[in-house]
Image (cartoon, grey):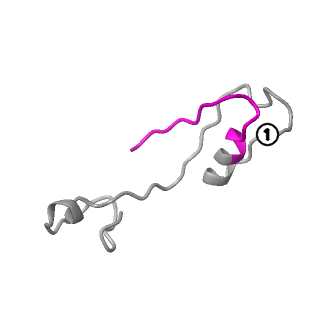
Amino acid sequence: MELAGIVGKANVGKSTLFSSMTLAPVEIGNYPFTTIKPNRGVTYLRINCVCRELNVKDNPRNSRCINGDR
């Protein structure tokens, strides 16, 4: 499982980005320091399959390889 974090300056849209990526309800406001506690969510990540890079056929157990993307 991949882990990612969203960090940056205050009042630049981190919570809006997080909410749109995870569809999780988070508090969003037009003033600094609206989000004090960390939010957690789950989203889907698409990566290039190794079969495209190595030119081999693979059989992934936890995902599907469609046109070289997982």
Nearer the observer, 48 or 61: 48
Q: Quadrant of the C terminus?
A: bottom left
Q: Residue furthest bottom?
A: 67
- Type of amino acid at the residue the image marks with label 1: Glu
**Horizontal side of residue 66 vs 39, given as left or right:** left
**Horizontal side of residue 16 vs 65, given as left or right:** right
Write down the residue under mark 1: 27
Q: Tag 1: Cα neighbours inside 10 Å, few (<14), some, or many (≥20)?
A: few
Q: State the residue at coordinates (53%, 35%).
A: 5
- Verify whether residue 4 appears in magenta: yes
Q: State the residue at coordinates (49%, 56%).
A: 44
Q: Is residue 14 above or below residue 42?
A: above
Q: State the residue at coordinates (58%, 36%).
A: 6
Nearer the observer, 53 or 29: 53
**Horizontal side of residue 12 vs 46, given as left or right:** right
- Verify whether residue 3 appears in magenta: yes
Q: Position of residue 18 (x, y in %)?
A: 64, 45
Q: Which span of residues is magenta-colored?
A: 1-16
Q: Quadrant of the N terminus?
A: top left
Magenta segment, prevailing SS (helix, strand or loop): loop
Q: Secondary structure beneath disc 1?
A: loop
Q: Position of residue 50 (x, y in %)?
A: 23, 59
Q: Is residue 69 above or below residue 11?
A: below
Q: State the residue at coordinates (61%, 52%).
A: 21
